[in-house]
Amino acid sequence: MRIQLSTALLLIAVTTINAVPTPHAPTTTDAIFDKLKVVYDQSETSKDCLACVAVLVTTKTLDRHNRSGVLKAFKKLCPTFQQQPTDVCDGMVDRYGAHFLDVLRHADIKGDDGKLICYGLYGRCPAPPLPAGALKFPKERPVNPAAPVHSGKLVDVLHLSDWHVDHEYSAGAEAQCDRPQCCRKYPEASAAPIRAASSWGDYNCDTPAKLAADMLTFIPKVTKADFTILTGDVPAHDTWLGTIESTQEVEHIAYETMSALSSKIYPTIGNHESFPASLFNTPSTGSDKWLYNSLADEWSRWLPDDALASARHYGAYSASPAAGLRIISLNTNFCYKQSFFNYADTHDTDPLGELQWLIHQLQAAEDASERVWIIAHVGPSMSDCLRSWSHRYTEIIQRYSPHVVAEQFFGHKHYDDFALYYGSDDGVKSAANAISTAWIGPSVTTLTNLNPGFRVYKVDTKSWNVFDSLTYVADISKGAEWDATGATPDWRLEYSARAAYSPYAPLADSEPLSASWWHNVATAFETDDVAFQKFWLHRSKSSGRIGACPADGACPSEIICRLKNGQSAEICPNTSGIYRRSLDGEATTKHRSNHDQLTHGFISADLGSVLHVPYTSDEPIHYVIKRISAILARTSLKSLVTCSYIFFNAT
């Protein structure tokens, strides 16, 4: 949560700027480090988009002169500025540092790429314009397409997400440690932990294998699911450690463990499935063939050959679990802001052609009168999905919903949540215009401040719409008590969505939990705080540890805005700070459970906060540097370190 090597990268770049008009920037590690300490002590931050771009330009220049010196400086600076143990800093630099610098080398930093990096990674540039023009589809949308017909017969479907089992979890280890991943035995750990981890888990740690196994034992007691969907993120959050081989081994163990379930599993790829975690190559940056082949080999337990062939190419596939239903598993990591390979060529919204492949699959389903479920990890409604990709995805949903796309399912957030799609982008959001629901599944992991959970959907066998959603949880705060008494987790039905919310949005027994109904539920939240607080508790899987969202503040309206927001291009207010990240892991409204934002912190400081200087893209950079140099003496970088926080912690 405190890893900020990106601060080092930024400070190096600022040092270079401050050195002008000296013709040669410092090139030795010691010289760079000494300069950075001076800048840290004497400078102050300000916020400006194009000054952030100028910093990227100089960083790129410095990297061309002495990459090894830059990487060594990262390692030296990280413990100083971020109070992280040396092994964590070294591991993060070794795994991510060169990749980030490679992106800068390939990117058009003075053009749109630089501005998008400063927007997506650092929040310092305005949101870029959405892609011009509309997508072209093979056929026009049918006029008044037939509404789906329900059979009246329901089957169960199990939804698992964000597994994140930590095989190094150690009962009795420190749960409040100084590393991104706690509940492990580290060499220098004290004999008396501040808070000892129970054998069943902790709110500040990933899932112990013991808890996951117990959950899999419990599941058959409450459902005989026809099939299971798994919406990604199998490995733990120890992203400063590991190798390709260890990542593959962890994934093999997880899929082997889950295969104990009697139902067939339809998985999707999470951001943590890659190595390094959250980095997914595009054609201009490299290849992830090893990853897609490895996952396809694991998924061969459940998927047919044609689906596996597609998975080996995109990390995506289409398969049919039942007559009339097609599951399309997408690799949405190509919209993930924290995969900085996505910034190497920002003019290409669809670098692997996956969105065109999705259109082809949906058109085939429409022609065959099939219903479709879309499953993926990172939801396009989420703020960490690139808005250009999300916008194109929304166009596709609007074209093929609700007559083809029956439901969408995602993970990543760790919360129990949902988001809605509407039939047009004209700002009209009504029950009549709500066309699709994005079901965001609760995580198995407790990280951070959440109970473990899973969902069971009651699904009609003809329309393939969800008629009820049942969330099951265990109260992990009782972990120490279970250890003391020899008891096992108290898995229980937390709530039925139909039973919990139909009092606020009446629904006939013969009707599904449609997007229109969820719109009415979210609208009820606007005026009924009892209803909203029920949702807020369910969101944390009844941990009650994600902080308050009181009716007399801005928080509820901001959350409801996001519920009614199917694409990241729509900007919801954040005056309450509800989506800020907490550094200390305490229960707070501002804390998110997304550990992806934690582990890449060394790459993603608030670069634009370093400088405040007007800049135009056609202005000579040496002129900008002169003006920046003139103001650096009276500005300070100190607040940068405190505001740059966490980048790669994720969900």
Image: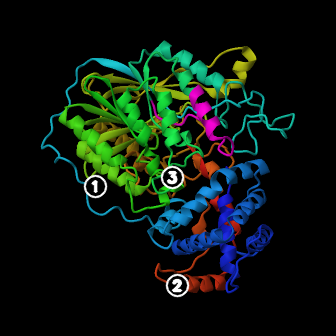
Task: Find the magenta span and give its range.
Answer: 230-253
**Dot 1 or dot 2, earlier in sequence:** 1
Is 238 located above or below residue 645 in the figure? above
Residue designated by label 3? 286
Label 2 crowd bin: few (<14), some (14–19), many (20+), radius 10 Å: few
Q: Position of residue 460 (x, y in %)?
A: 29, 23
Marker count (numbered): 3
Residue 238 is a magenta residue: yes
Write the residue at 27% across / 53% down. Answer: 428
Mark 2 / mark 3, whichever is N-terminal = 3
Q: Is residue 548 above or below residue 224?
A: below
SS at mark 3 in the image: loop
* Residue located beneath label 2 in the image: 620
> How far, Cα to Cα, is label 2 from label 3?
32 Å
SS assignment at label 1: loop
Q: Which residue matches tag 1?
A: 425
Residue density around tag 1, few if under 14, some if 14–19, many if 20 or more, within 10 Å: few
Which three-letter amino acid code belongs to the residue tagged 3? Gly
| Furthest-right residue in this view | 191
Task: Determine the CA span between mark 1 and mark 3.
Answer: 35 Å
Left or right placement of residue 33 versus residue 330 in this view: right
Left or right: where does residue 528 sit relative to residue 291?
left
Residue 390: image location, x then y, percent: 38, 52
The amino acid on which the numbered mark 2 sits, given as a three-letter code, is Pro
